[in-house]
Image (cartoon, grey):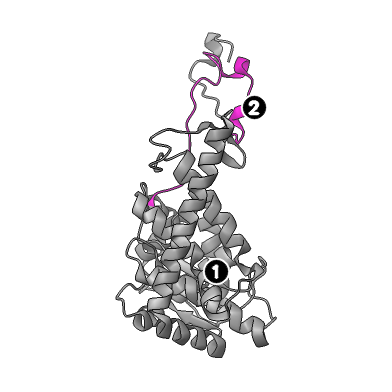
Amino acid sequence: MDGFDSNKGVVIMAATNRPDVLDKALLRAGRFDRQIVVPLPTEKGRRQILEIHGRGVPLASELDLDKVAQFTAGFSGADLANLVNEAALMAVRRESQDVAMEDFSLAIERIVAGLERDMPLEGETRKKVAYHESGHALVSALLPLTNTVHKVSIIPTSKGALGYTMEMPEGDRLLMSKPALEQRLAVMMGGRAAELLIFKQTSTGAANDLERATATARQIVTEYGMSKKLGPVRYVGPASKGFLGSQASALSLSPETEQLIDEEIRRFLDEAHENAMKILTGNEPALHEIAQVLQDEEVIDGEAVARIAGTGRVAS
C-alpha cells in the first residue's frame, strides 16, 4: 500500500460496518481509497442467494423460490442463509424428505415474529389481544396501498409480543407516496382503534404501535417534506452511517419550528387514528368475525381475513 512496484497487482480489501470512524489517513489515495457500499439484496438478488444456500438442501419440486424472494424484502444475505436452515429444520420436525413452501413460511414467521411460547392467553386478555390484532388486519386488508395480510396470531412470542399481524410485501418498494405512508400509519393505529371501539378504553398493548407510528410520522414531517405547513424543507441533518444503520442527525431549530413539527406529527397521527376508527366502525361485523376466529383458533391466515373483509388481496 506504499506504492512500491513489488505490490503491483495485489489488491487489498477490507470490510467494516463503521465507516464513520475510519481515519482519513487510512482512506487517502493509494490506500483504501475506493469505497463500495453493499446494500440489502433486491428481489432478484434474494432469489439468487436462496439458490446458493439451497444447493445442499432437498428442496421440494413445487417450491417457488421467486415467491420466497418476494416475501423476504429487507432480508440480508445472512438472514436468507438462516431462513434456509430454519426451513430445513421445520421439514425435519414434520418428518418430511423435502423442504416445502410451508416450511419457508413457518421459518419466515419464526425469524420475524420470534418463537411461539407455550403460554396461551386467557380471559379478558385473550379477547383484547384478539380485537387488537383484528384491528390491524382489517384496516390493512381494506386499504389498497398497504402490504397484504399473511397471518394473524394471538400466540405470545419470544420477542415479547402477545400477538402479531404479519404482512407480506408484494415486492421491493423503493419509493413510497404520501398516501401510502398515511395508510401505513392507519394500519399501525388499527389495533388501538379497535380496542377503543370495542372496550371504550385502550391498553398498554399499543405501546410499540405508537412508537413506530410516531417515528414514521416524524420522518414524514422532518425528512420527506410532506407537511403543507412546514413545506418542502428537510429539518434534520445528513444521515450518519454507523453499525446500527443510517441515522439522521439533529439540527438546531427555533422553538417555534419545533412546536410546529410536534403539532404536525400529532396531526398525522390523529388523522391516521380517525381513518382507522372510521374503517373499523363501518366494518364492525367483519371485526367481530375475525376476532372470534382468533379467540377460537388463535391463528387466522390472510386468505380468511381477505374473505371476511370482502377483498381479494391475499398473500399467496
22 within the magenta span: yes
Could you give the CA–CA distance between mark 2 and mark 1, rounded to whole angstroms? 42 Å
**Residue closest to the eye, 239 or 224:** 224
**Residue closest to the eye, 168 or 187:** 187
Disc number for residue 238: none
Please give the name of the residue rendered at 47% of the width and 52% of the height, measured from the top-left corner.
267
In the rendered image, which quarter is residue 4 located in?
A: top right
**Of helix, strand and loop, which mostly describes the magenta segment?**
loop
Residue sitting at the far top: 4
Please give the name of the residue rendered at 48% of the width and 58% of the height, measured from the top-left corner.
270
Residue sitting at the far front: 256
Q: Give the range drawn in magenta.
A: 16-42
Inspect the image, locate mark 2, and give the three-letter code of the amino acid beneath it: Val
- Check disc 2 and report its element: helix, strand or loop: helix
**Position of 184 relative to 62 (above/below):** above
Residue sitting at the far left: 312
Please give the name of the residue rendered at 48% of the width and 82% of the height, measured from the top-left corner.
300
Q: Residues within 10 Å of mark 1 (few under 14, many from 20)?
A: many
Q: How far from the left and from the top, in percent, is residue 11?
A: 51, 24
Q: Can residue 185 be seen in this view?
A: no
What residue is shown with label 1? 192
What residue is shown with label 2? 21
Please give the name of the residue rendered at 55% of the width and 14% of the height, measured from the top-left corner.
28
Residue sitting at the far right: 119
